[in-house]
Image: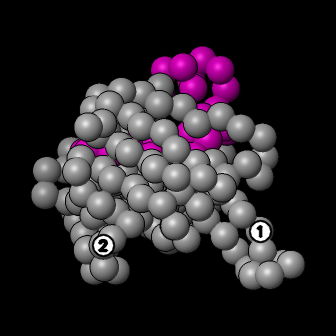
Amino acid sequence: MAYIEFDNVVKSYGSGDAEVRALDGASFSVERGELAVVLGASGAGKTTALNILGGMDTATSGRVTVDGRDVTAESESELVEYRRADVGFVFQFYNLVPNLTALENVELAAQICPDSLDARETLEKVGLGARLSNFPAQLSGGEQQRVSIARAVAKNPKLLLCDEPTGALDYATGKQIL
């Protein structure tokens, strides 16, 4: 059995004539340690698939398992624990806390995880060692994106989900981060 099984997943919004299917029978599998990339046109359901895989949204039907755990059958409290301990997210729009420094944003995520990495060292690894005390508004878009990446990585998650993780980065920095 693969580490991730996304089996015939449907995600619908609305009903009747107004129903929109963001996902319509999507299926894929990923082995442990494998890097998988989901490609598609804008509006194809990539973010929806990541949100369901990460336990932030629910499937209308189908089944999602991660390391043998049926994410689609979990209660809300089980999903909270899954997101907290097992999943790191790099969001398309960063989702940084504006009144926390770069270091505090990363520490916030690291503090809720049992085997987290050092926040300062993680920020240094993404090239932000000199920007630890800066607030998000004092950082460029690319720097904010690197804080978001550091925050996700510092959790030391079993599963790292990235929604356009290098979109705000130049080619060389994006290559370095990946």
Q: Is residue 137 left or right of residue 159?
A: right
Q: Is residue 154 magenta?
A: yes
Q: Which mark is residue 20?
A: 1
Looking at the rendering, the stretch of residues picked out in magenta corresponds to 149-177
Q: Is residue 104 left or right of residue 48?
A: left
Q: Can residue 77 be spotted in the picture? A: yes
Q: Nearer the viewer, residue 130 or 73?
A: 73
Name the residue at 52% across, 44% down.
Answer: 27
Q: Residues within 10 Å of mark 2 (few under 14, many from 20)?
A: some
Q: Nearer the viewer, residue 121 or 85?
A: 85
The quadrant in which residue 143 appears is top right
Q: Nearer the viewer, residue 21 or 164?
A: 21
Q: Are marks 1 and 2 in contact (CB under 8 Å)?
A: no
**In the image, what residue type sits under mark 2?**
Glu
SS assignment at label 2? loop
For marks 1 and 2, give the CA distance: 24 Å
Q: Which residue is mark 2?
A: 74
Name the residue at 35% across, 43% down.
Answer: 4
Image vertical order of residue 60 relative to residue 30, above or below: below
Q: x and y percent of residue 32 in the render? A: 27, 32
Q: Is residue 96 magenta?
A: no
**In the image, what residue type sits under mark 1?**
Val
Name the residue at 65% across, 56% down.
Answer: 23
Which mark sits nearer the N-terminus, 1 or 2? 1
SS assignment at label 1? strand
Q: x and y percent of residue 55 in the render? A: 41, 64
Residue farthest to the left, as pictured: 114
